[in-house]
Amino acid sequence: MDFQTYFELNQLYARYARALDAADWEAWPEFFIDHCVYKLQPRENHERGFPLATLAFDSKGMLKDRVYGIRETLFHDPYYQRHVVGAPLVHKVDADGRIHCEANYAVLRTRLSKESTVFNVGRTLDEVVPTPEGLKFASRLVVYDSEMIPNSLIYPI
Protein backbone atom coordinates (compact mmCIF):
# COMPACT_ATOMS: atom_id res chain seq x y z
CA MET A 1 0.00 0.00 0.00
CA ASP A 2 1.37 3.40 -0.93
CA PHE A 3 1.50 6.31 1.50
CA GLN A 4 -1.30 8.27 -0.21
CA THR A 5 -3.75 5.37 0.13
CA TYR A 6 -2.81 4.83 3.77
CA PHE A 7 -3.30 8.55 4.40
CA GLU A 8 -6.76 8.37 2.77
CA LEU A 9 -7.60 5.34 4.93
CA ASN A 10 -6.63 7.26 8.08
CA GLN A 11 -8.73 10.20 6.91
CA LEU A 12 -11.73 7.89 6.41
CA TYR A 13 -11.44 6.69 10.01
CA ALA A 14 -10.98 10.24 11.33
CA ARG A 15 -13.91 11.68 9.34
CA TYR A 16 -16.13 8.79 10.41
CA ALA A 17 -15.37 9.42 14.11
CA ARG A 18 -15.83 13.17 13.71
CA ALA A 19 -19.26 12.71 12.06
CA LEU A 20 -20.45 10.47 14.90
CA ASP A 21 -19.01 12.76 17.58
CA ALA A 22 -20.79 15.73 15.95
CA ALA A 23 -24.08 13.78 15.78
CA ASP A 24 -24.09 14.23 12.01
CA TRP A 25 -26.25 11.14 11.56
CA GLU A 26 -27.13 11.88 7.94
CA ALA A 27 -23.42 11.68 7.06
CA TRP A 28 -23.01 8.24 8.64
CA PRO A 29 -24.49 6.11 5.80
CA GLU A 30 -22.38 8.01 3.25
CA PHE A 31 -19.24 6.39 4.63
CA PHE A 32 -20.54 3.08 3.18
CA ILE A 33 -21.17 1.68 -0.28
CA ASP A 34 -24.78 0.80 -1.21
CA HIS A 35 -24.39 -2.96 -0.66
CA CYS A 36 -22.61 -2.83 2.67
CA VAL A 37 -22.61 -4.71 5.95
CA TYR A 38 -22.53 -3.05 9.38
CA LYS A 39 -22.72 -5.20 12.52
CA LEU A 40 -22.12 -4.78 16.23
CA GLN A 41 -21.25 -8.01 17.94
CA PRO A 42 -20.02 -8.95 21.41
CA ARG A 43 -16.47 -10.29 21.44
CA GLU A 44 -17.57 -13.60 22.96
CA ASN A 45 -19.96 -14.30 20.07
CA HIS A 46 -17.36 -13.29 17.50
CA GLU A 47 -14.61 -15.47 18.96
CA ARG A 48 -16.92 -18.48 19.23
CA GLY A 49 -18.19 -18.03 15.68
CA PHE A 50 -21.76 -17.32 16.78
CA PRO A 51 -23.66 -15.15 14.28
CA LEU A 52 -25.77 -13.29 16.86
CA ALA A 53 -25.16 -9.53 16.63
CA THR A 54 -26.62 -6.69 18.68
CA LEU A 55 -27.22 -4.70 15.48
CA ALA A 56 -26.99 -5.98 11.91
CA PHE A 57 -27.59 -3.98 8.74
CA ASP A 58 -26.87 -5.19 5.21
CA SER A 59 -27.40 -2.12 3.04
CA LYS A 60 -27.00 1.64 3.03
CA GLY A 61 -30.80 1.83 3.01
CA MET A 62 -30.91 0.03 6.36
CA LEU A 63 -28.34 2.50 7.75
CA LYS A 64 -30.56 5.37 6.59
CA ASP A 65 -33.52 3.72 8.32
CA ARG A 66 -31.47 3.66 11.52
CA VAL A 67 -30.75 7.37 11.11
CA TYR A 68 -34.49 7.99 10.77
CA GLY A 69 -35.03 6.01 13.97
CA ILE A 70 -32.40 8.04 15.82
CA ARG A 71 -33.91 11.32 14.66
CA GLU A 72 -37.62 10.58 14.80
CA THR A 73 -38.54 7.61 16.98
CA LEU A 74 -35.97 6.96 19.70
CA PHE A 75 -36.40 8.91 22.91
CA HIS A 76 -33.63 8.98 25.51
CA ASP A 77 -31.67 11.25 27.79
CA PRO A 78 -29.32 13.26 25.58
CA TYR A 79 -25.62 12.57 25.68
CA TYR A 80 -22.46 13.30 23.76
CA GLN A 81 -20.09 10.72 22.34
CA ARG A 82 -16.37 10.97 21.75
CA HIS A 83 -14.57 8.32 19.70
CA VAL A 84 -10.89 7.59 20.21
CA VAL A 85 -9.73 5.45 17.30
CA GLY A 86 -6.36 3.82 16.81
CA ALA A 87 -4.47 3.84 13.54
CA PRO A 88 -5.80 1.19 11.17
CA LEU A 89 -3.75 -1.97 10.87
CA VAL A 90 -3.80 -3.17 7.26
CA HIS A 91 -3.84 -6.96 6.90
CA LYS A 92 -4.19 -7.28 3.15
CA VAL A 93 -4.92 -5.31 -0.01
CA ASP A 94 -6.65 -7.23 -2.82
CA ALA A 95 -5.79 -6.72 -6.49
CA ASP A 96 -9.01 -4.67 -6.92
CA GLY A 97 -7.91 -2.31 -4.13
CA ARG A 98 -10.13 -3.75 -1.35
CA ILE A 99 -8.39 -3.12 1.97
CA HIS A 100 -8.81 -5.58 4.86
CA CYS A 101 -7.97 -3.74 8.07
CA GLU A 102 -8.84 -3.25 11.72
CA ALA A 103 -8.56 -0.60 14.40
CA ASN A 104 -9.11 -0.39 18.13
CA TYR A 105 -11.60 2.13 19.48
CA ALA A 106 -13.00 3.55 22.69
CA VAL A 107 -16.23 5.53 22.95
CA LEU A 108 -16.65 7.91 25.85
CA ARG A 109 -20.12 9.14 26.78
CA THR A 110 -20.98 12.37 28.53
CA ARG A 111 -24.48 12.97 29.82
CA LEU A 112 -25.48 16.55 30.48
CA SER A 113 -24.33 17.69 33.93
CA LYS A 114 -22.53 14.42 34.60
CA GLU A 115 -19.00 13.06 34.35
CA SER A 116 -17.74 11.36 31.22
CA THR A 117 -17.64 7.57 31.34
CA VAL A 118 -16.28 4.82 29.12
CA PHE A 119 -19.28 3.62 27.13
CA ASN A 120 -17.85 0.99 24.81
CA VAL A 121 -14.45 -0.36 23.74
CA GLY A 122 -13.34 -2.90 21.18
CA ARG A 123 -12.13 -3.08 17.60
CA THR A 124 -13.53 -2.76 14.11
CA LEU A 125 -12.85 -5.36 11.44
CA ASP A 126 -13.24 -3.53 8.15
CA GLU A 127 -13.23 -3.98 4.41
CA VAL A 128 -12.70 -0.69 2.63
CA VAL A 129 -13.04 -0.19 -1.11
CA PRO A 130 -12.03 2.57 -3.52
CA THR A 131 -14.94 4.45 -5.11
CA PRO A 132 -15.11 7.54 -7.34
CA GLU A 133 -15.94 9.50 -4.17
CA GLY A 134 -12.92 8.10 -2.29
CA LEU A 135 -12.53 5.19 0.12
CA LYS A 136 -15.70 3.78 1.68
CA PHE A 137 -16.61 0.91 3.97
CA ALA A 138 -17.94 -2.21 2.27
CA SER A 139 -18.10 -4.03 5.60
CA ARG A 140 -17.68 -2.90 9.19
CA LEU A 141 -17.88 -5.41 12.01
CA VAL A 142 -17.69 -3.69 15.40
CA VAL A 143 -16.57 -6.24 17.99
CA TYR A 144 -17.05 -4.80 21.45
CA ASP A 145 -15.21 -6.29 24.41
CA SER A 146 -17.92 -6.23 27.08
CA GLU A 147 -20.98 -8.43 27.02
CA MET A 148 -22.87 -5.62 28.70
CA ILE A 149 -23.94 -2.33 27.13
CA PRO A 150 -25.21 0.32 29.56
CA ASN A 151 -28.91 1.00 28.96
CA SER A 152 -29.17 0.73 25.21
CA LEU A 153 -27.14 1.24 22.09
CA ILE A 154 -28.73 4.14 20.26
CA TYR A 155 -25.99 5.76 18.20
CA PRO A 156 -23.63 4.00 15.80
CA ILE A 157 -20.11 3.17 16.89
Image (spheres, rainbow, N blue to C red):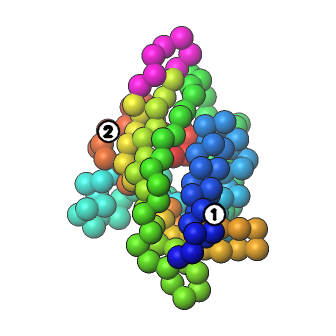
Q: Dot 1 surroundings within 10 Å: few (below 14), some, or many (20 or more)?
A: few
Q: Residue furthest front?
A: 3
Q: Secondary structure at mark 1?
A: helix
> In this orientation, which residue lies closer to the viewer: 35 or 136?
136
**Disc 2, SS:** loop
Name the outermost residue toward the bottom.
95
| Label pair 1/2, CB-CB below 8 angstroms | no
Would you say 104 lies left or right of 94 here?
left
Which numbered mark, 1 or 2, is in the foreground of this view? 1
The image quarter containing residue 11 is bottom right
Residue 39 on image: x %, y %: 47, 58
**Residue identifier under label 1:** 8
- Residue 57 in sight in this render: no
Q: Residue furthest right?
A: 132
Q: Residue under label 2, please give it.
A: 148
Tell me the amino acid under the disc marked 2. Answer: Met
Point 30% across, 54% down: residue: 43
Image x and y of residue 115, in percent: 45, 16
Residue 64 vs 150, above or below: the answer is: below
The residue positioned 71% from the left and 37% from the top of the image is 72
Read off the magenta span: 111-117
How many numbered callouts? 2
Give the number of the disc on residue 82.
Answer: none
* Snapshot quadrant of residue 132: bottom right
Q: Is residue 99 visible?
A: yes
Determine the image quadrant of residue 97.
Answer: bottom right
